[in-house]
Amino acid sequence: MTRLITRRGAVAGLTIGAGGLLSGCDAIGNNKLFREALIFRGSDWNETLQRALMKRGALAPEYRPDQRSPIFRTNGTTNPGTSAYAAHVANHFADWKLTVDGMVKHPLSLTMAQLRSMPTRTQITRHDCVEGWSAIGQWTGPHLSMLLDLAGLRDGARYIVLHCADRLYGRNYYESIDLLAAYHPQTILAWRMNGAPLQIGHGAPVRLRVERQLGYKQAKYINHIEAVSSLASVGQGKGGLWEDVANYDWYAGI
Amino acid sequence: MEEKGGAPPKLYRHRLATRIWHWLNALVIFIMLGSGLMILNAHPHLYWGQYGANFDHPWLNLPRWPGWLTIPSTYNLALARRWHLTFALILAFALLIFMIVSLINRHFQRDLRIRAREVAPRHLWADIRAHFAFRFHDPDRPGAFNILQKISYAATIFVLLPVIILTGLTMSPAMDAAWPWLLDIFGGRQSARSIHFICAALIAAFIIVHLTLVLLAGPVNEIRSMITGWWRMPEGEGE
């Protein structure tokens, strides 16, 4: 047999093969079966593995004041921009209502003054955006678990949904976390940042800090907290705005 | 392919575990590099330290990677993450299994052990000159890896791949809570992200050199040996 496969031929073959593989990846990545069998399952596998490796209450690292980012950039919505929100800003959020309802025994409706009178936790933590950047800042606010205990979760409640005043893709922002994250000791409703009232760009008057997950879970401009038994009825069913509109993973620990 | 007269002797060079791992990696690393570049497109700036974002000083600003290099080919961070974080599990567990099997079947001890006399400057220099003369095999032991091969394989298996896996884990906020020492060994999440990229670049460089040397050493024999395990000794170099 003669040399049918020359070196030059092999180089060309490898190059064409690699190009073909790459364009093939688009077709495979859009294939429903492949998504459901593999790449959309990976997030569940990672969540299961991380849960197995992690103590329930394991704390996200906390930093010294001098380790904070000099400028903590904003992201996502930097101002809800609605006339209702502008009125709240003008009024220093005196009429802002934070309601807690859904599968709870005693629905709550709290003013910011009431929220600010609750005992707080202060933590200097790292905010990790899904895009790759990180910023370190100090956050102060009551434990989310304190509000949930005041409202009293009913049996069957499994997720906490945060409804927000900012709008994206024609709907109000929403995110959800499970009870493990909701009752984590670093999960707080922050109304102070770096020793000052939370700025508009960072979600004034109150935002979530859930420190073992990525930035898109840190819902801003929160006015409604809802306990639910399933995520099926939340938005389009994937548990959050970015999950619904762009297929981001619901589990944002990685 | 060069069967005239007496066929050159064959050597069983690559065990099944090595071959399976090799071809699995050919696929998985291809996917990791493509999806990794897409993820990098979301924020193509690298920093040292615990934090790093737009108002901080990057040590490296990268170009936007073109669609023919990324998975998927048009901007989609969510889908690239799905590819990357799923195949990362395959990469990591395949490496772990390969390492255990290669200790048991003694592939590491037999084929990758670097001996002191091999890293003596004279020996290294002789091997570098041999590479430039396109002589890749020791006539006395044609099946053995030469020292440059051993160093690059060992560095990839024992340094680059473990470090790229651990720096990947360091970027996970949940893993930083579970294993805070990850941040200590790499000096922060943004340092880990930078090291992750450097390792990826070195793995890409390894692949380019590896493919070039396969072509120079005789692609048919080399690729066939990685499929069947059997490698035909170079003519004139066999016993």
Image (tube, helix red, strand yellow):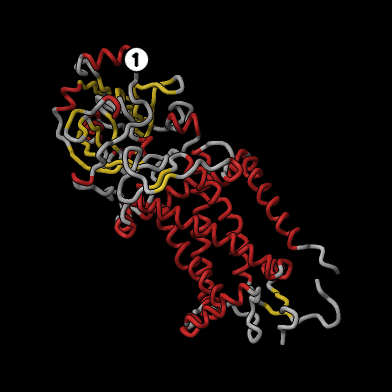
Q: Position of residue A118 (x, y in %)?
A: 15, 30
Label 1 crowding class (10 Å Cα cut-off): few <14, some 14-19, many 20+?
Answer: few
Image mark 1: chain: A
- Say which residue appears at 73% left-offset and 59% top-offset: A10
- Viewed as shown, does residue B204 lie left or right of B213? left
Answer with the quarter of the image where residue B20 lies. bottom right
Q: Position of residue A156 (x, y in %)?
A: 36, 34
Give me the residue at 45% from left, 56% from top: B198
Residue B90: image location, x then y, percent: 53, 56
Which residue lies at the image location 35% right of the left edge and 52% below the top edge?
Answer: B191
Res. A119 visible in picture: yes
Residue B71, by quadrant, is: top right
Residue A38: x, y in percent? 56, 47
The residue wearing badge 1 is A82
Q: Nearer the viewer, residue A240 or B46?
A: B46
Q: How many marks?
A: 1
Residue A144 or residue A148, whichever sits in front: A144
